[in-house]
């Protein structure tokens, strides 16, 4: 019997469909892999852009031109502090909503009624430096609770001082928060001293040039292309606005923090004054980590933005992301603004941190724990 010729593999009826299926499965797998690697990057980029847009919503005075002094800003008056209570300086709790209502109701008197004290969470530190020989970021650091190996979370609230009513609503929140006050806000010594008495750590929020030309960070902004000595003058003006802060973080700055010439001015001044730098990370091109290391400036970086979207539910979701980051890495730095939704979300979230196994700390505690001091 003659042998029949062997049938080629490709001629078999099941081979072509099988190959097509294999190619399809491989393509789907590659697509999923690329998506997983790309989407987080896109999400983070979107968050950075949304953050600078969110910071634009803060009321600000116009820029000063040619070094001219700005006229007094038309800002709502500071809510008057109540008289010292029997418990001493720490026993000065305030209910700002009640004060505001009392001041606007018919027949209200100029003297606000007595207010019930707001319970304070922890003993309040002295405003005076506790280590006179140490650099400022150590002298003015708020003592951190013992962590006992638990993950740490630092909550930073930016843009404080411009909207005084909301800024004052932040002060009674559980300490220690890290509160960053705008360079050009009014009554900074009074506001920052009240924040410090509440047990919060202080920072200076410095306007830096964003990528968007239509976005105005405010007066005395640090800008790319400006002579270094002019940027130094603007920075020094901000650094002299009040005392007792541990360092600075950038307001916007997606363009400026990527500029080596400009950021060298920042690092030189921080090194000279013994201050730290917190990078809000509004650009992936930031040179702050490298230059801070080169200049020996204590450094930390933001991990989560919490209120690009201003609703209580959205802020709570972002705070849960901060929890997840802290569990994975041992510490997380979350940054927000003094929006009503942010304040309400923090009022709900902060009291439950201990039960979840987290420790609320000032940002300097994370700098020290990460060895970046």
Image: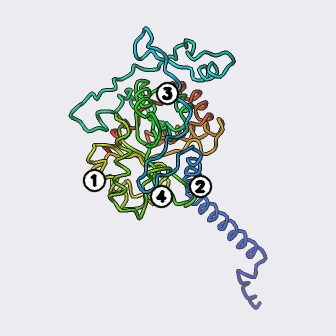
Q: Is any part of residue 285 visible from this angle?
A: yes
Report if residue 356 is visible in the image: no
Chain-order first, disc 4 or disc 1: 4
- Tell me the mark number nearer the camera, choosing from 1 and 3: 3
**Mark 3 or 4 closer to N-term?**
3
Residue at x 42%, y 46% (from the top left corner): 249
**Alpha carbon distance from label 4 to label 2:** 12 Å
In this rendering, the answer to whether 372 lies above or below 89 is: below
Residue 70 location, x and y as percent? Answer: 47, 46
- The quarter in which the N terminus is drawn is bottom right
Q: Which percent across, then down, holds residue 187? A: 45, 33
Q: CA–CA distance between discs 2 and 3?
A: 30 Å
**In the rendering, at what x and y percent does residue 250 appear?**
44, 49
**Residue depicted at 55% across the width and 15% down the height:** 111
> Taking 336 as reference, is 314 left or right?
right
Q: Earlier in the sequence, mark 4 or mark 2?
A: 2
Looking at this view, name the residue that lies furthest to the bottom: 2
Outermost right residue: 13
Q: Does residue 4 appear left or right of residue 30 in this picture?
A: right
Q: Any mark on residue 171, and which? A: 3
Judged from the image, the secondary structure of the residue bearing numbered disc 1 is helix
Q: Position of residue 20 (x, y in %)?
A: 72, 72
According to the picture, the residue beneath numbered tag 4 turns out to be: 284
Question: Which residue lies under the disc numbered 1?
Answer: 295
Cα–Cα span, label 1 and label 3:
33 Å
| Disc number for residue 46 | 2
Q: Name the front one of labels 2 and 3.
A: 3
């Amino acid at each position: 019997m003659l042998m029949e010729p062997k049938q080629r593999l490709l001629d078999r009826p099941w081979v072509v469909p099988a190959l097509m299926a294999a190619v399809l499965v491989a393509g789907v797998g590659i697509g999923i892999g690329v998506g997983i690697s790309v989407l987080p990057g896109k999400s983070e980029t979107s968050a950075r852009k949304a953050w600078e847009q969110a910071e634009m919503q803060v009321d600000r005075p116009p820029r000063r031109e040619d070094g001219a002094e700005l006229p007094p800003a038309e800002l709502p008056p500071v809510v008057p502090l109540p008289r010292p209570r029997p418990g001493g300086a720490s026993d000065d709790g305030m209910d700002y909503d009640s004060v505001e209502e009392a001041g606007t109701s018919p027949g209200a008197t100029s003297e606000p009624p007595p207010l019930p004290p707001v319970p304070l969470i922890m003993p309040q530190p002295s405003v005076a430096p506790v280590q006179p020989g140490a650099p400022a970021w150590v002298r003015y650091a708020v003592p951190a609770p013992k962590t006992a190996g638990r993950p740490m979370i630092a909550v930073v609230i930016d843009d404080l001082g411009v909207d005084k009513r909301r800024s004052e609503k932040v002060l009674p929140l559980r300490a220690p928060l890290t509160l960053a006050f705008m360079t050009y806000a009014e009554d900074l010594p009074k506001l920052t001293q009240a924040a410090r008495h509440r047990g919060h750590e202080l920072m200076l929020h410095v306007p830096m040039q964003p990528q968007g030309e239509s976005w105005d960070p405010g007066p005395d902004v640090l800008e790319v292309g400006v002579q270094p000595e002019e940027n130094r003058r603007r920075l020094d003006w901000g650094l002299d606005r009040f005392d007792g802060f541990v360092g600075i973080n950038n307001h916007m700055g997606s363009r400026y923090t990527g500029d080596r010439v400009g950021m060298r001015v920042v690092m030189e001044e921080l090194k000279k004054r013994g201050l730290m730098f917190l990078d809000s990370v509004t650009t992936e091109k930031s040179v702050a980590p490298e230059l801070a290391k080169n200049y020996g400036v204590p450094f930390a970086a933001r991990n989560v933005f919490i209120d690009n979207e201003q609703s209580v539910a959205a802020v709570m979701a972002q705070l849960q992301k901060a929890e997840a980051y802290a569990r994975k890495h041992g510490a997380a730095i979350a940054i927000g603004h003094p929006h009503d939704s942010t304040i309400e979300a923090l009022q709900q979230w902060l009291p439950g941190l201990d039960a979840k196994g987290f420790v609320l700390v000032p940002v300097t505690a994370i700098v020290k724990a990460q060895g970046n001091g």
